[in-house]
Image (cartoon, rainbow, N blue to C red):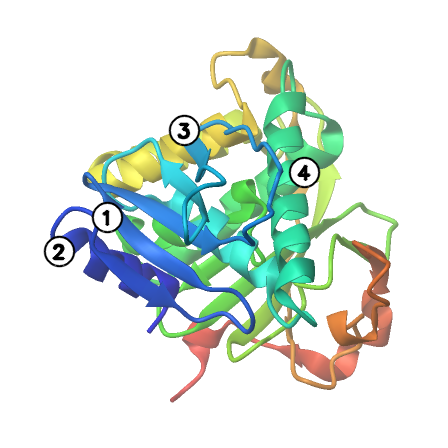
Amino acid sequence: MTFSEKFALALAGINLKAIPLHHDVLSAYAVNAGGKPALLVKVPQDFDRSINGTRGIDVHVDAPNVVDRFISFRSESTGMTTMFDAVVDSLLGSSNSTANAGEAIERLLANFEQLQAMFASRGGMLTEDLIRGLFAELLMLLELRAAGFSADIAVNAWQGPYRSAKDFILPGGKCVEVKSLRRTNHHVNIANTDQLDPRDEDLRLAVVRLEKSAHGDGRGILDLVHDVKAWAAATPSAHISFTQALDALDFDVEDPRYEQWRFQAKDWAWYKVLEDFPRVRQVDVPPAVSNVSYRLDIDQIKSFESKPFWTEQD
């Protein structure tokens, strides 16, 4: 069962119902905390870190005199949200496949600190790189709409704004990592080893080339936001997820400065990320290295070209 399915079981039960979550070295649980989902992770008895919460998530560490001590990451929202689902996936995914529980706890907390820093640093208008990334992910939402996905499925699959391992995690183990390219560039930036780690998923890398347009040409980012927002509005869960995603990005739809950002989008290029796909693997990263980012030359991965998985026959 997926993390989402186990949280659904916990939330469907009585208050404080706990469901074990799979992790290579940590004891972790999905918990119903008064209708709000909480991730509990067991910590050593001598754990002495003080962890603050962040936007949408409360954090609590059990007192030292408690026999079994846990750190709790609790959503501030009732029911499972895309944001909390993505955070759980990111925290547990980043700390998996480690040598021991101590190292896993350190990686998990380092990942959460990156999330805190991301939210704290947001303010004012997004940078051009963030705008391009958001534009590409909004385009992918519209691609999913055109392919027949419901707003509920597509928008709730969008986990890019939350530092999740993949930008889109769809039902059936179908995942998409979205990248944008400038007109003359042939490299995409890979932020960490998780982005192109297929695990047991059908993972596709989708790349779109974006050329900045003059006023009146191409499509504006505000146009895309309003298009997706109107699509999501008819479905309560999709509407909530889309609003939370924009909040996580600190994207103000009323800011007129975004009107200048218009792009012409070329056709998508799709690549199937198989086990032999060229990438940096976490097992090859020394334990002393906390994170690895790199650039991938798309001219060198033509042998992995594919189509969207929804166009393939089962």
Q: Is residue 155 visible?
A: no
Q: Kindly give the residue lying farthest to the bottom in the view shown.
A: 314
Does label 3 or label 1 sit earlier along the sequence?
Answer: 1
Using the image, tell me which numbered label, if any, was put on residue 13.
Answer: 2
Please say whether residue 205 is visible from this viewpoint: yes
Of helix, strand and loop, which one carries label 1? strand
Residue appearing at x 51%, y 71% in the figure: 308
Dot 1 corresponds to which residue? 32
Q: CA distance from mark 2 to mark 4?
A: 42 Å
The residue tagged with tag 2: helix, strand or loop?
A: loop
User: How far across and down, in percent of the image, does residue 11 sit?
Assistant: 20, 52
Q: Quadrant of the C terminus?
A: bottom left
Whether tag 2 and tag 1 are in contact, CB under 8 A, the answer is yes
Q: Earlier in the sequence, mark 2 or mark 1?
A: 2
Q: Nearer the viewer, mark 2 or mark 4?
A: 2
**Residue tagged 4:** 132
Q: What label does residue 226 carry, if any?
A: 3
Tell whether 59 sits left or right of 96: left
Mark 2 belongs to which amino acid? Gly
Pick whichever, 131 or 279, lies toward us.
279
Q: Give the answer, above or below, for where 5 lies relative to 40.
A: below
Mark 3 touching mark 2, by CB under 8 A?
A: no
Residue at 47 percent across and 55 percent down: it is: 42
Amino acid of disc 3? His
Give the image quarter of residue 153. bottom left
Q: Label 1 is placed on what type of residue?
A: Asn
Q: Earlier in the sequence, mark 3 or mark 2?
A: 2
> Residue 3 location in percent, x, y?
37, 63
Q: Position of residue 197 (x, y in %)?
A: 65, 71
